[in-house]
Image (cartoon, helix red, strand yellow):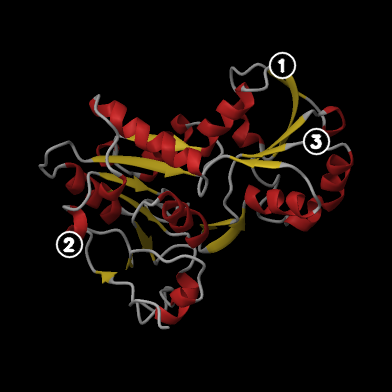
Amino acid sequence: MTAPSVPTLRHFEAVAERYDLILCDVWGVLHDGTRGHVAAGEALIRFRELPGPRPRRVILVSNAPRPWQGVQKILDGYGVPRGAYDAILTSGDLTRRLIAEHPGERVYHLGPERDAPVFDGLDLTLVSADDAQRIVCTGLFDDYTETAEDYREALAEFRQRNVPMICANPDLVVERDKKLIPCAGLIAQAYEAIGGSVVYAGKPYRPVYETALAMAGELDRRPAPEVSRTVAVGDAIRTDIAGAAGYGIPSILVARGIHAEELGVTAEHHSLGDIAEWLGRQPVRPDAVIERLVW
């Protein structure tokens, strides 16, 4: 049987009235790793201004492996207006909760120093790989030159000692300077492949959606918005779209993100063509596709 077609939206305005809450991805939707997407910020502001029986809310849901304050600082630097969103929830925030469940542990940080704020104020001791009771993987030490293969020996040694891992960013890749950069999810996958124990913090796993919906309710001191009145907007099939589908949340795929080459919307190809064949090969399907988030 032929799968039903997925509608292509020219403007988010066409469906905005259906929703009370947007769970919006950050990297790939609001910025590309070097600059903000002005139209996306404007679209979120326009959504938040819509009248309705309850306030329209936007929660940015990011797999960034650092607390939300760090993501907000980056967004400020890219010119993303704070009026575009109500709150930020990151994988780093969820990682801190997971670490707090094991007070006093010796933790090895596998990742760049820029992600160290994820440990601030927590009851732990940062140690070398040899002394670790738990690994927290926030990424590759050098994501410009390294691949997961560079960590094969280190992961094998951790596996011999059955050291569990928290993956603080389930993304496999992100786009930076029009290149795909490897993320912590690749390291975690490699560790799982050799039998290592991994807990993931962030999309596409259920706790991030439970937390985000609860946050939306707390903003208004009301019950969380209905799932059917919530929409997830993101550029990654594996995390944004699959996670929303698994929770029963409608989703919109932003084409000009990490799948841009596959979808034919690179700089050389400026219009979104027929993507039915590509979507038909994916494990999950969005409810709609939009080139960029625009009002």
Q: Which numbered circle lies on residue 163?
A: 3
Q: Give the residue at x 49% y 75%.
A: 262
Marks 1 and 2 sit apart, C-alpha to C-alpha, by 51 Å
Q: Which mark is residue 2?
A: none
Residue in the picture at 86% in, 47% down: 156
Residue 60, image quadrant: top left
Give the amino acid at mark 2: Ala
Asked which secondary structure carries label 2, the reply is: helix
Circle 3 sits in a helix, a strand or a loop, which is it? loop
Query: Residue 288: image x %, image y %?
Result: 32, 66
Q: Position of residue 235 (x, y in %)?
A: 43, 59
Q: Earlier in the sequence, mark 2 or mark 3?
A: 2
Q: Amino acid at mark 3?
A: Val
Looking at the image, do the residues carrying marks 1 and 2 touch, with CB atoms under 8 Å apart?
no
Q: Residue at x 23, y 68 (%)?
A: 10
- Disc 2 from disc 3: Cα separation: 49 Å
Q: Say whether residue 164 is left or right of residue 229.
A: right
For the residue carrying disc 3, how many other residues have a C-alpha within 10 Å: few (<14), some (14-19), or many (20+)? some
Between 227 and 106, the one lying in front of the other is: 227
Can you tell which mark lies on residue 104?
A: 1
In the image, residue 210 above or below residue 23 = above
Q: Which residue is mark 2?
A: 14
Location of the N terminus by quadrant is bottom left
Q: Which residue appears at 23% of the width and 27% of the height?
A: 220
Between 76 and 11, the one nearer to me in the picture = 11
For this orientation, the residue located farthest to the front is 1
Q: Is 167 situated left or right of 53 in this image?
A: right
**Pointer 3 or 1: first along the chain:** 1
Q: Quadrant of the C terminus?
A: bottom left
- The vertical placement of 230 against 166, above or below, is below
SS for callout 1? loop
Neighbor class of circle 1 (other Cα within 10 Å; few <14, some 14-19, many 20+) is few
